[in-house]
Amino acid sequence: MSEQTPAEAGAAGAREDACRDYQSSLEDLTFNSKPHINMLTILAEENLPFAKEIVSLIEAQTAKVFIHPAIELLFFYRRV
């Protein structure tokens, strides 16, 4: 069993901090707020090394949110 080097431990801690901060801010987004969305965008840009984890957080949060069926149809028709 190998132990983490200090650099690996630091990177893991930075990842956890970035994900915790992003998740907290994402949960605060409860309505369509451009300033809040801009802040989330900036936060994601500042944490590009953790992009995969941030995308997973966004996907998980999106799955929790109720989307009215009429809105789904609107998105569908805009793609066609």
Image (spheres, rainbow, N blue to C red):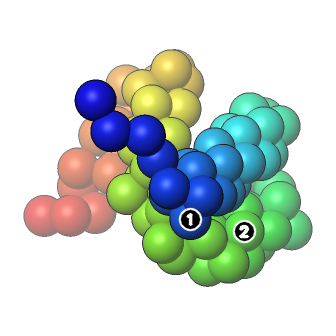
Which quadrant of the figure contains the C terminus?
A: bottom left
Q: Amino acid at mark 2?
A: Leu
* Front residue (pair 41, 50): 50
Q: Residue at x 66, y 49 (%)?
A: 13
Establish if 22 lies above or below 36. above
Q: Residue at x 72, y 48 (%)?
A: 17
Give the residue number, with chain letter if any, for mark 1: 7
Label 1, label 2: how many angstroms apart (C-alpha)? 23 Å
Q: Position of residue 61 (x, y in %)?
A: 53, 32
Q: Is residue 28 left or right of residue 66?
A: right
Q: Is residue 38 left or right of residue 45?
A: right
Q: Position of residue 36 (x, y in %)?
A: 83, 60
* Front residue (pair 32, 27): 27
Give the residue number, with chain letter if any, for mark 2: 43
* Front residue (pair 32, 29): 29
Quarter location, residue 3: top left
Q: Is residue 48 left or right of residue 31?
A: left
Q: Residue at x 68, y 78 (%)?
A: 46
Bin the neighbour count of mark 2 within 10 Å (Cα to Cα): few under 14, some 14-19, many 20 and up: some
Which quadrant of the figure contains the N terminus?
A: top left
